[in-house]
Amino acid sequence: MKIVFAATGGNWDSKVDSRFGRAEGFVLYDEEKDELSWHSNAENKAAGHGAGVQAGQKVVSLGADVVVTGGNFGPKAAEVIQAAGIRMIPDAGEVTLKEAYTKIKK
Amino acid sequence: MKIAIASGKGGTGKTTLAVNLASYIAGLEDVTGKVVLVDMDVEEPNSGLFIKGDLMKSEIKYRMVPEWIGDKCTFCKKCAGVCNFNALAYIGVSVLIFPELCHSCYACSELCPEDALPMKADRMGELRHYSISDNLHFVESRLDIGIEQAVPLIKETHDFLKSEYDESDIKIVDSPPGTSCPVIEAVKDADLVVLVTEPTPFGLNDLKLAVDTMKELDKRFAVVINRSGIGNDEVERYCFDNGISLIGKIPQMQLAAELYSKGQLMIEIDEIKREIDKIWRNIVELK
Ligand code: SF4
Ligand code: SF4
C-alpha cells in the first residue's frame, strides 16, 4: 500500500501538515519497498487559486492508496482525490508521521 | 464618453457618486445624447437600489468552459499540467474540470489530440437593461452565485455598450472595488477614472494603491473625497503634493445618510447637488 502524508518535512519525525492544498509538501511511504520520499509542494503553496486541485492531482500521480492530512482537504482537493478512488483520512492532528502511521495501522 | 468610478476598496461611496452623477447629468439641458449608468461591480451590483426604471431587455451571458468527453479520451496525459489556472486535473481514471477556476483560455481544448475537451457554453450571469427616463438608461450585470470569474462578464458588458450606444453618449461606469483584474477590465477604455475615497488614514492608504494601479495602466484619473469633514486633511495634501486633480468633496451630512438608507438620491440636497455639478464640470474639462 502507498500512503501519502501532507507534511512539514520529509522524515518520520516530521509533523503532519494541517493544510492540504498549501501543505509544505507530501511524504510518500511505500510499504512494500519500505521507502519514504519527499515531494515539495512549493509551486502550489504560492498558487493564487486552485492549490487544492493541483495538490490533489499530485497525490493522485504519486499513486497513493491512502492520503492523510492534519486538518481537512478542502472541497476541490477532496473532489479530485475522491474521483481517483483514494481513501482520505482527515483530522490526523498535530502529530508526527510515525504517530499518524501507527494510528492508521490500528 | 466613458467615465469610470472606482475606489481602492468597497464602501467608500463609489456607487453613490456613480448613481447621483448619472442622474444629475441626465437632467442637464446642455447634455444631448443619452446618459447610461453601468454597474460593472458584477459580484455585488447595487446601483439598482437607488434608481428604478422599466426593464427593456435581459440577456443571459455565457462563457466557454471545456467539457471532458470520457469516450474520446485515450488517457494520453497531455492535458495534465497544461492549465495555468489549476482548473483541470488529470487523475488517470478521468479528467476533472473546475469551471469556477477556468479562464476560458482554450489551451487544454486545443492541445487535446482526441478532441476530448471541447469547449461548451456555461452560464455565468445576466445583463439587464433598464430605461429610467427618456435619456437615462441603466445597465446592470450580475454574476451567478458561485461564479468566480468577473472579467468575462465585464467584457460582455463593454461589448453590449458598444452595440447599444454611440461614442458621444455618456457612460458612467460603477467599477468593482479594489485593484485586481476585474477593476482593470472595467476601467479599460474609460476616458477618465474618478477615484472615490474617504478623508481618513485607511482611505488614503487604499487611494494610494488605486493611484498606483492607474499609473501602471497609464490612465487619466482624478480624485473625489466622499464624506468630507470626517477624518483629516491628509488625502487633500497627498493629492496636492502629487499633482493629482481633486475634483470634488461631497460633504458628510446627516440628511444624506438618511436619504441613502432609504435608497434615495443625494442630489435632492442643494449643497450636494452643487458639488456634483462641480465634479461634472471638472470631468468635462479633464477627460
Ligand atoms: S489530452 Fe485529451 S485525450 Fe489526452 S488525456 Fe487529456 S483529455 Fe484525454
Ligand atoms: S480552457 Fe484554459 S483555463 Fe479553462 S480548463 Fe482549459 S486550460 Fe484551464
Image (spheres, coloured by chain):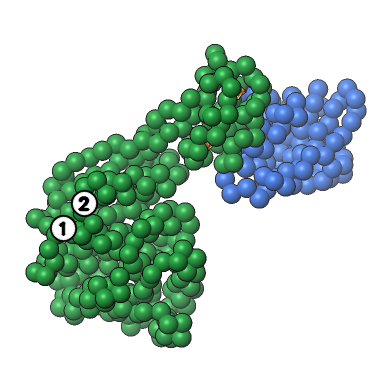
Chain colours: A blue, B green
Badge 1 vs badge 2, beta-carbon distance below 8 Å: yes
Q: Looking at the picture, how far across and down is residue B282, in whole percent?
A: 26, 77
Q: Which residue is mark 1?
A: B34
Q: Is residue B37 visible?
A: no
Residue lying farthest to the front in this orientation? B167
Number of labelled discs?
Answer: 2
Q: Vertically, is B22 above or below B126?
A: below
Q: Which residue is mark 2?
A: B165
Amino acid at pointer 2? Tyr
Q: Is residue B176 left or right of residue B81?
A: left
Q: Is residue B14 left or right of residue B272?
A: right
Q: Is residue B24 visible?
A: yes
Q: Looking at the picture, how far across and down is residue B229, in whole percent?
A: 33, 83
Local secondary structure at mark 1: loop
| Residue B218, quarter of the rendered image | bottom left
Local secondary structure at mark 2: loop
Residue lying farthest to the top in this orientation? B71
Identify the subunit bearing mark 1. B
Identify the subunit bearing mark 2. B
Q: Is residue B88 left or right of residue B9?
A: right
